[in-house]
Structures are given as structure tokens and as C-alpha cells.
Image (tube, grey):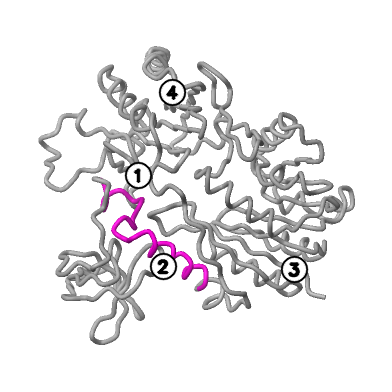
Amino acid sequence: MRKKLDLVISGLVIEAVAAEGKALGHTPDGEVVFVPFAVPGDVVDVRITKKRKNFMEGFIVALKKPSEHRLEPFCEHFGVCGGCKWQPLPYEMQLEAKRQQVYDQLVRIGHLQVPEIQPVIASERTRFYRNKLEFTASRRRWFLDGEDPDALSPAERCGLGFHVGKYFDKVLDLRLCHLQPEPSNSIRLFAKAYALANGIPFYDIRENTGVFRSVFVRTTENGGTMAIVCFACDFEGRVPFLEALSAEFPQISSLYYIINAKVNDSISDQTPLLFKGDDAIYEEMEGLRFRIGPKSFFQTNTPQACRLYRVVREYAALTGRETVYDLYTGTGTIAQFVSRNAAKVIGIEYVTEATEDAKVNAIANGISNCEFYAGDMKDVLDAGFIAAHGSPDVIILDPPRAGIHPDVAEVILKAKPRIIVYVSCNPASQARDLSALCSDYSIVAVQPVDMFPHTQHVENVCKLIRKD
């Protein structure tokens, strides 16, 4: 068993924002110390929890002198909840830190040749900007400082909210979350109160017992609301629960439930069942209407998604004559966003339900030059597929955080599109993929976009042009 560290560094000066949302300072001996929830200029005492050859990690035990930049966190759950870690950091500093993150991954670590990285496009909202949240129910909630678990009733031990840190079985019971607009908070609070009042057992993921598992809430800019309630099994009180939720919130236009008997919480392999209302809600961008089902992928910050897609369209530099491949197309939002300026758009996506939504969206929007195909990208996109559908003039990539498979990069290089537009939520994997593509391409533009204020996450768009 590793010996527990008993080391406190006093008077550490926080110098800069670092990776993974942490900040850093140096000891008098020059050792790097990474600290969460700190702001450049803070002077802090830090208890060390991890000591390695080149760095240490710890947490603040005393704020000796706050930075002149430090802001008071606006959320009562700050410091316990795993999200919105940058609340004490002024928004302008957050944007600059994200720009630096992109530079570090592409240039300092990735050794890529890039033009000047543009300032990050700021989010017009820094609170209540998300259109989707999942709240997990747990019989074993996270206990706050000062609480005596032995003095709490079984009901008081239950929670509905977000997982805490690396604890898969611990949930922080939320009172007010600043991420999603109403009726999100009200739906969560009502669902918790109803389950407790009616004796519906909260799920225990350790023991795989209980009934009430989670609540998803999806909202749109025009007031659409979808709620999805997950249960571990069907039970006699399911219909009254859902009827009560529907009666309390008539603005829920689409109400689903899922019976998930698995131990893990993922619903990707589950079947949502419509209980009441419409089978989807709809979002609009630039006159385009997008269907959002219970399992559809859609960017979680809608106004910023629109700005992101405009950057993609600008970088694609379409004239109306091009064949465009939109890889990892999701529900076809980017594909349809650029379709007016292209001759043909081919979208490929792993999730079959998403491609079905994409086809419905294209028909609803009167778009006839988009085709969508489902399957694993490395299996679908090959020489035969390109021969059947035409060589791409432009390829747009928007992969998951892991980036693209090496086989996909190889096919792209063989396809020889004139322009590649690479959208990524993970500059580290993006840098790795760009290294492979830059054997034949040059990066000519880099534009970060802030989709997630008060977090370290950043979306980044790179434009590549084929070398002569």
C-alpha cells in the first residue's frame, strides 16, 4: 500500500492556468505544483496528494491571499460538483487560457506549423447555456462537510444530480444548477420529491437495487422540452409517476421513459419508450429545422453551435460545385448547414438513429443533395465507398474526443480532397490526427470556439489545404 503523503506547501504563488482545468505554481526548489480551483495571483497553502518525479498535485487548504482577478463563485455547489471549475476565473482569462491550450497541443506538444491562432469565439451566455443534462438518482448521495450520515434518514441519504469526481456511486444532490434553463431545475426537484413521497426506491449502483435511476432533460431555443425518466425495472407506480410529471409540467412536449436493467447508466443500447406527447423536439438554425429525438446527438450550446458551423462553412469555401463528405455527421447539422453551397453532401455516422434523424431533417428542410449512411467510420469509408459516391472536394471531420482511426486518416489522404475542415472537442487528439494529415496538407487557419464556459473544454476548428 502506498504511504499517504503528509506534505503541505505554504505560500504557493499560483502563476498560470494549466491543463485539465488546474492552475500551477512552483516551489522555491522549482518543482511544479498543480492545483484545482485556483486563480493566477492567488497565494495558497496546498496539501500534496500526489508526488511524481517532475510534478506534484494537491488541493488548497488555505487561501492566504486571493488574486486580484479572483471572482466569487456564483454556484453553491462549486468545489464539490465536478463541473464549472473556472467560476473564480474572469471570463476573459478563461478564453485566453483556452486559446493557450490549443496552442500548447498543436504547437508546443504537437510541433505543428500553424498560422496565428485566432481569439476564441466567446459564448453569448456563460450561464444556462446547455440544452441537455442528465441527472443521476442514487441511494448513496455525497455527504457535505458538517453532515453526519448517521443522523440522516434513508430519504435524506438519497440524491438526484451529478456524479462527484471519480466516485461512480456517489451523486451530489443538486438544489440549483446554473447550466440549463428552466424547467430543468424544477423538473429535477419535482422528480426527486415525487419519488421520495411515493416510496419509489432510488437506485444503488453498487448493489444493483432500487428503481429510480435518472432523468434527462432536453430543451430548445424556442421553448421545446423533452424529459426522459429511467427506471431499473417496470413497476406499478411508473404510470402515476409519469402522469404526475406531465401534469406538473405541461411544457414537456415529449415525455419518454426507459427501462434499464443493466448495471451501467448508459442508454445508448436502450430503447426509449414514448409515454406522452411528440416523439421529438425541434431546434432551428438559420431557417433550418433539426429533429432531436431522445438519443440524438446535438451540440449542447445551441447559439455557439451556430457560430461553430458558420466557421466550418467559411473554411470549406464552397462554390456550389463541390462534393462534400461530412464524417461523424451526427444528425446531419453540419451537412445541412453547408448543403446550400455544395453540389452534394455525403454524411457518415456511427449511430443509426442519428442518421435516421438526419434523413428526416433533410426532407423537412427541403434539402435533396444530402445522403446519409450509418456504420463504423473505418469500415464504411473505404475506396469502394468513394468510388460509388464520388471523390470528395472537401472533407469535414467532427469526430468524438478520441479523434479519428488511423485507417480513416489513410483513406482521407488517398481521397485527396482539396480542403479538410477538422472540428474537434479535444485539441490533443486533434493534434495527433493533424500530424498524420499534414504529410500532404498545410494548416492555414485555426479558430477555437467556447462551447462550455467555466470549464477547461474548448472546441477547435482547423482548415487544411492540400499541398501542391
Q: Which residue does the numbered mark 3 point to in the structure image?
A: 465
The magenta stretch is 77-103
Secondary structure beneath dot 3 equals strand
Q: Quadrant of residue 314?
A: bottom right
Which mark's residue is nearer the viewer, 2 or 1? 2
Tell me where residue 93 appears, x and y as whole percent.
Answer: 38, 65
Query: Which residue is at 48% across, 25% downward?
Result: 259
Cα distance between the residues tagged 4 and 3: 53 Å
Mark 3 or 1, nearer chain start: 1
Which mark's residue is nearer the viewer, 3 or 1? 3
Tell me where residue 20 appears, x and y as whole percent.
Answer: 40, 63
Cα distance between the residues tagged 3 and 1: 42 Å
Secondary structure beneath dot 2 equals helix
Which mark's residue is nearer the viewer, 4 or 3? 3
Mark 1: which amino acid?
A: His
Which mark's residue is nearer the viewer, 3 or 2? 3
Q: Which residue does the numbered mark 4 point to in the structure image?
A: 233
Mark 1 or 4, nearer chain start: 1
Q: Is residue 351 above or below residue 384?
A: above
Badge 2: residue crowd in 10 Å (few <14, some 14–19, many ≥20) = some
Res 163 label: 1
Cα distance between the residues tagged 1 and 4: 22 Å
Mark 4 or 2, nearer chain start: 2
